[in-house]
Image: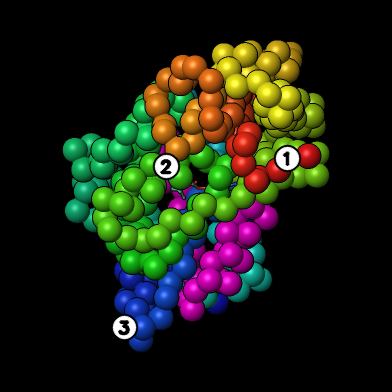
Amino acid sequence: MIRCERPDQARAWCAAGRDEGRTIGFVPTMGALHEGHLALVARARAENDLVVASVFVNPLQFGERDDFERYPRDFEGDARSLASVGCDLAFTGTLADFFPAEVGADGRFEPRALRAPGPAARGLEGDLRPGHFAGVATIVARLFEIVRPTRSYFGHKDYQQTLVVAELARELGYPEVVVCPTLRDPDGLAMSSRNRRLSADDRPRALVLSRALRAARDLWQRGERDPARLAERMREVAGDRGVELEYAALRDPERWTPGEPRGPLERAVALVAARVGPVRLIDNLRLDGPEGLS
Ligand code: PAJ
């Protein structure tokens, strides 16, 4: 596997691959990789001639209350993991490398250069993390421009992000966005780089997220279609000491609205966010879909 410390080197390598007529599968990440990330790379490997991954903890998508400084970083370990699943090229860089024209001499990103995300950024994560999706859209657009992938792979785990990215890709006219299932630990906890920061006491508490989603799915399977009652059930299950629930909500996955839809749902994705100790976790589950959580 080729490792590039500078995005420009990656840009040149990808351009050469494209000139030879090869398809490129791309997996953007912030590193501290786990099996969930590697499953995206494996899927990209199966569907493309070349596989490229980026590892960059993007400061633009972190707010003041967020954990940018404490976000785990391990490029060496990440590069080894990526190589083990057949990645061809992994690249990283600094904020100034990615945005030479937008970052000033003082190291600050010019706020006017932030990209406005589409309507899917409204509600839930968009409300609780102001500016988050602008930061995501800005880096993802730049990464797409560097790699010019045929397909790009994202996890269902960050459900609203997949919608924001799909809107971005529609606007740009490329790439195809492939959404892959959430990988979980055997006890149901969705894999996340942030799980590394859970204490031994907090780790079992974090299970309330997947438990709440499972409870909503059980109710759905018994015929409940009222979003308020499904959300209420999730709040009951997630009401645990040591867990600060930020939201438990329902959305129609095909008609995203900033607020909860009214009236009975035809399709549903249940979404939760909670602070467990010092860590903010999110998870979601399609209630009607094929993605299972046992
Ligand atoms: P990061 O949190 O590192 O996630 C990179 C990709 O891995 C995202 O598409 C995310 O949804 C996916 N992922 C994370 N946990 C997963 C799991 N348990 N199962 C399956 N996929 C999982 O998301 C970001 O980085 C950033 O916002 C990024 C898109 C790289 C822009 O900076």
Q: In this rendering, is residue 200 above or below 23?
A: above
Residue at the far bottom in the pictured view? 20
Q: Which residue is mark 2?
A: 163
In this picture, residue 79 sits left or right of residue 6: right
Q: Position of residue 8 (x, y in %)?
A: 32, 69
Picture residue at 68% right of the left edge, 24% below the top: 223
Q: Which residue is mark 1?
A: 293
Crowdedness of circle 2 by 10 Å Cα count: few (<14), some, many (20+)?
A: many
Q: Earlier in the sequence, mark 1 or mark 3?
A: 3
* Residue interval drawn in magenta: 35-63
Q: Distance of mark 1 from mark 3, alpha carbons? A: 42 Å
Q: Position of residue 272 (x, y in %)?
A: 59, 26
Picture residue at 52% right of the left edge, 52% below the top: 179
State which mark lies toward you, 3 or 2. Answer: 2
Picture residue at 63% right of the left edge, 59% below the top: 39
Picture residue at 26% right of the left edge, 38% below the top: 116
Q: What's the mark number on residue 19? A: 3
Q: Is the N terminus in the top left, top right, bottom left or bottom right quadrant? A: bottom right
In this picture, residue 228 sits left or right of residue 170: right
Q: Distance of mark 3 from mark 2, alpha carbons? A: 30 Å
